[in-house]
Amino acid sequence: MLKRFVQVLIIPFFLLTCYSANIANAEEKEDRSWQDESMYFIMIDRFNNGNASNDFEANPKDPKAYHGGDIQGIIDKLDYIQEMGFTSIWLTPVFDNEEGGYHGYWIRDFKKVDENFGTLDDVKTLVKEAHKRDIKVVLDFVVNHTGYQHPWLQDPEKKDWFHEKKDIANWQNQEEVENGWLFGLPDLNTENPETRAFLMDAGKWWITETDIDGYRLDTVRHVPKDFWEEFSKEVKSVKEDFFLMGEVWDKDPRYVAGYTETGIDSVVDYPFFEDASAVFSDVGGSPGMLANVFKRNKVLYKDPYILGNFIDNHDNERFTRKAISNNQNPVTRLKMALTYMYAAPGMPVVYYGTEIALDGGKDPDNRRMMNFRANDELIKYVSKLGEIRSEFPSLRRGDMEVLYDEKGMTILKRTYEEEVTVIALNNTDKSRNAILTAEVLDENKELRGLLTGDITKEKNGKYEIILDRETSELYEVGEKTGPNLPLISVFVVVPALFAGFLFMNRRKKQG
């Protein structure tokens, strides 16, 4: 009989759990698109050595040589990437490179995997394993140039495949930018029909062979726009939802945005990078100014929500180094920067090593080997941010409004349909508070902290948000919560019934 009663006691717990699960499952889910992605950017050679047998040119002591990272190493760490909440990965070029091309940008063969990285089968396996985990794969694709010693340079029949050897002298002259030899690299003549046809074919070949999901297009501004118009159509004829994210390295947002008119879906947002890394690598800057980046992007781009937001990459000194140069704690500063990057409109792109505050100066020091034994404080923080961003559509799709911005303390509101979230940032060296009126957030609501669990309720028509120095919080705006009566009944009424059962059972035995 006791066994049956215990089973009865379990029923309320079961019903409560099922009720909560059904509520969650009943919520309408949005179709996943690129604005919902969070991307992990990997330099193949510097991430993880999964196969020592292909370390043909490896010399870890030389910062300009191969260090041993390979495709197998990435496969081995897919669970690590997934656990941090990333839904896509972007890899530096896998193409066969000439000697010393550990970074992948000195291409020798456009249809062959670099032997130091592995094989074509390894790439196929990587894509399959990533897709099993619902992770998309984006490859870096280069059409502007080849390696310094490419065999085509010695082929008389391919003389017209290159522009005349001439360095870029005037960076404001678009013709020079497109035809000049960038850093002395042989510049491909993409106006030549044969050259163009080869590159179009290579672009489609990798999609067909490996089932990748997108390209990050290197040195986009150095290639004529009409090439990109044709390239976009060609690759999307193979895979309709194929994603193209271009690198247009320029501070002028209008110039950068112009390339998305060619069929390229998105760009890595260099103007965002310049502003965000400056604001968050030091104390005192106003995060509120970054809202102007989004306002500008809404005007300039057809879809500003799929721009790649980043604070670190392989071409600039690490954010950690910038913070250290400002005599700041890099972990503290990274938490501030990452919170904003994950909560602001756009797709967060995290460079490998940022999650452990990897240090590094200018190229190649910013490409140090990943350390998987580092402190996991930031890793946990990134994972939490990924979880929150995934849970709240307003952080991926919502509009953004500045509610408060004074002397380094900034409050932002994001709204999507009926959902409202709040981003609070104290970028100062003192504890700060901000008072918001109920008019901007609605009456009789509460702000539930998603990072720390802090709750702020409306009182007398106002909300007071208090943040310690150099901290941030993301809030869900919801109805005020009272006592959880169903839960209380489970933990109060059921034990009382059980006590009554024991009492009656004892009396029965005594009788």
Image (cartoon, helix red, strand yellow):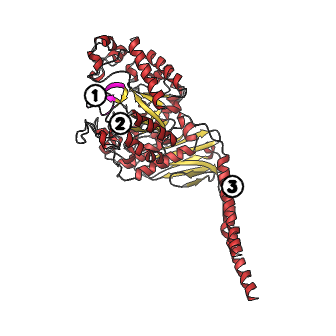
Query: Would you say the residues marked 1 and 2 are in contact, meaning their CB atoms lie under 8 Å apart?
Result: no
Kind of element beneath mark 2: loop
Q: Nearer the viewer, residue 259 or 501?
A: 501
The residue that mark 1 highlights is 98
Residue at 51% in and 42% down: 132
Q: Earlier in the sequence, mark 1 or mark 3?
A: 3
**Residue farthest to the right, as pictured:** 511
Asked whether residue 108 is drawn in magenta, I would say yes
325, above or below 17, in the image:
above
Gap in Å between the C-alphas at discs 1 and 2?
A: 15 Å
Q: Is residue 239 left or right of residue 117?
A: right
Residue at 69% in and 59% down: 15
Q: Earlier in the sequence, mark 1 or mark 2?
A: 1
Bounds of the magenta segment: 96-110
Amino acid type at image mark 2: Gly
Q: Is residue 109 left or right of residue 205?
A: left
Amino acid type at image mark 1: Glu
